[in-house]
Image (tube, helix red, strand yellow):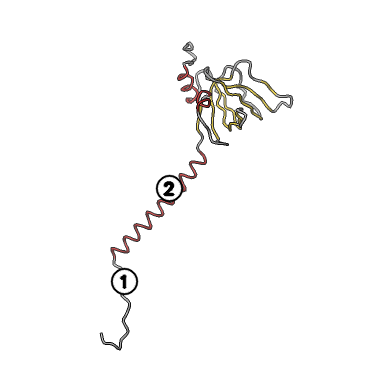
Amino acid sequence: MNAETPARPPTRVTTRKRKRLYTVLAGLAMLGVAAALVLTALRDNLVFFYSPSDLATKELAANQHIRIGGLVSEGSVVKSDDGHTTNFTVTDMKATVPVSYTGVLPDLFRAGQGVVAEGKLRPDGVFQASEVLAKHDENYMPPEVADALKKSGYWKHADEQPAK
């Protein structure tokens, strides 16, 4: 180099290895973004199941969408004057939860039957159900409800006597 030629800035040579590295890093970044989007979508649709005993011991986030299950307590079903709202209690024989539901109840809904209600727990302790599901025959009970009743020591299958 002589003094009359201006010095060139050093050039960066992009090799095949460097291009491959950039491609792999870009792919990993896209995979990370896709995983984050999937997890966010799943979190919004995730609904946890609780028995009345679980609700008594757990602290829930405000407006958390959950499911509760158990048996409809005997003598607890009260329909409002407008005919649309029904109040009842759900029990697992250890604890009870008051439930309020506005809408048409399933035909098989009655006291002493297994039920799963989906909705939110209000600040006053009443569960505001947006959907109520009842068991459809004598041999079927939602697995979550059956497990909660077995755990509480009260399990009544069509062929079994309740455990006390």
Q: If you read the primary sequence from the N terminus, does the residue marked by circle 1 or circle 2 appear first?
A: 1
Residue 82 position in % (x across, y down): 73, 27
**Secondary element at tag 1:** loop
User: How many numbered marks does the figure carry?
Assistant: 2
Which numbered dot is residue 12? 1
Please tell me whether mark 2 sits on a helix, a strand or a loop: helix
Q: Nearer the viewer, residue 89 or 118?
A: 89
Tell me what residue is drawn at x 53 percent, y 22 percent.
70
What percent of the width, then of the height, locates residue 126? 61, 27
Please report the residue visible at 46 percent of the width from the left and 16 percent of the height from the top: 153
Quadrant where the N terminus is found in the figure:
bottom left
Name above or below for residue 162 compared with residue 103.
above
The amino acid marked with disc number 2 is Ala
Instruction: State the residue at coordinates (61%, 26%).
Output: 99
Measured from the top left, where is residue 42 in percent x and y? 48, 41
Residue assigned mark 2: 35
The residue positioned 46% from the left and 44% from the top of the image is 39
Q: Residues within 10 Å of mark 2 (few under 14, many from 20)?
A: few
Q: Amino acid at mark 1?
A: Arg
